[in-house]
Image (cartoon, rainbow, N blue to C red):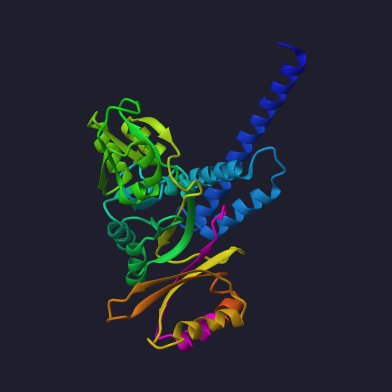
Amino acid sequence: MTEPLKEIRDQIDALDERLVALLNERARLAQRIGHLKDGPVYRPEREAQVLRRVRELNPGPLPAEVLTRLYTEIMSACRALEAPMAVAYLGPPGTFSEEAVVKHFGAAVNGMPCGSIDETFHSVESGAAAYGVVPVENSSEGAVGRTNDLLFLKPVAICGEVMLPVHQCLLNVSGRAEGFSKIYSHSQSLAQCRGWLNAHHQRAERVAVVSNAEAARLASLDENAAAVAGRLAAQRYGLRIVAANIEDEQRNITRFLVIGAKGAGRSGRDRTSLVMTTRNRPGAIHELLMPLAKYQVSMSRLESRPARSGLWEYLFFVDVEGHEQDENVAQALAEVRERATFVKVLGSYPIAPDS
């Protein structure tokens, strides 16, 4: 071994020694906070501030997203020193929803796979889970209507968001691109990969199932079948990847919401979601949104859903930039309430670091 190489390795060893000591000192401080707060504490605004500061301090060569993942896991491990949090998600294990849980909370949580979005909401509402992660929209397939309906109906609050790049893979037992006549997947994933499947496996029967993880499970039991799902599902169910990144839209992103008993405090870079209704008359929605322009509140999303209260009545789901406690947002919301027939703030929460 050359002397310069040994010197560099000795420096790495010394840095590792310091890193271990510093990480444990950080963990002890986190424990002190947990004792003061009477248990493990997840503060979405504080964790968002930590991740944002780490990215701002980063001079490289490590990419910002790598440091974000590292610090997410550090904070997750520190939280778990007291007791792991229960986080509900749309199961079974191996879904993109589980990936979103790990991306946002880190691996040191107790994931609770649920059979439906309704069950995920109920787990949070009943206290069986501290938080839940639910899909709300996909960049190519649009809004998830059931999530919006339950946000309107249930007494939960949005306290975070996760932007997850969705990379679909074709999976089967053999790893070969032939020998199967059936492809399982969720209907939305089949739609996201329609062009690729038409070009490469047009004759294979496409069977829609409740989730990509269920598709992978079924494919693991049948050598004549394949599944469209993510890499995590391949790992969970012992499948091999036939082809990766087969989605037609390469910037295919699903946005997930984190729901809990209450929203988050101000982090400095926040989003507020609300749902509202107005009278069914010409110009009503324009009039309803005028206060946002008046107080320079930027709107990033507007979705409409049929209301259950009557024919041709709609709920409007709106995302705006800023926290509901910010002065301009508070002023705008006050005037929106004067004009709307109904307003519910669904939550204010930190904007995802990679959005």
**Image vertical order of residue 81 relative to residue 133, above or below:** above
- How many labels sit on residues? 0
On-image quarter of the N terminus: top right
Question: Image quarter for residue 25?
Answer: top right
State whether residue 110 appears in this view: no
Q: Position of residue 268 (x, y in %)?
A: 62, 64
Q: Residue at coordinates 33% horizontally, 36% vertically from top-left?
A: 201
Q: Residue at coordinates 46% horizontally, 82% vertically from top-left?
A: 285
Query: Looking at the image, which residue sits at the far top?
Result: 1
Q: Which residues are magenta?
A: 332-355
Q: Nearer the viewer, residue 221 or 196?
A: 196
Query: Looking at the image, which residue sits at the far right?
Result: 4
Q: Position of residue 61 (x, y in %)?
A: 69, 37
State whether residue 333 appears in this view: yes
Q: Nearer the viewer, residue 229 or 337?
A: 229
**Image vertical order of residue 181 relative to residue 137, above or below:** above
Q: Residue at coordinates 31% horizontally, 50% vertically from top-left?
A: 187
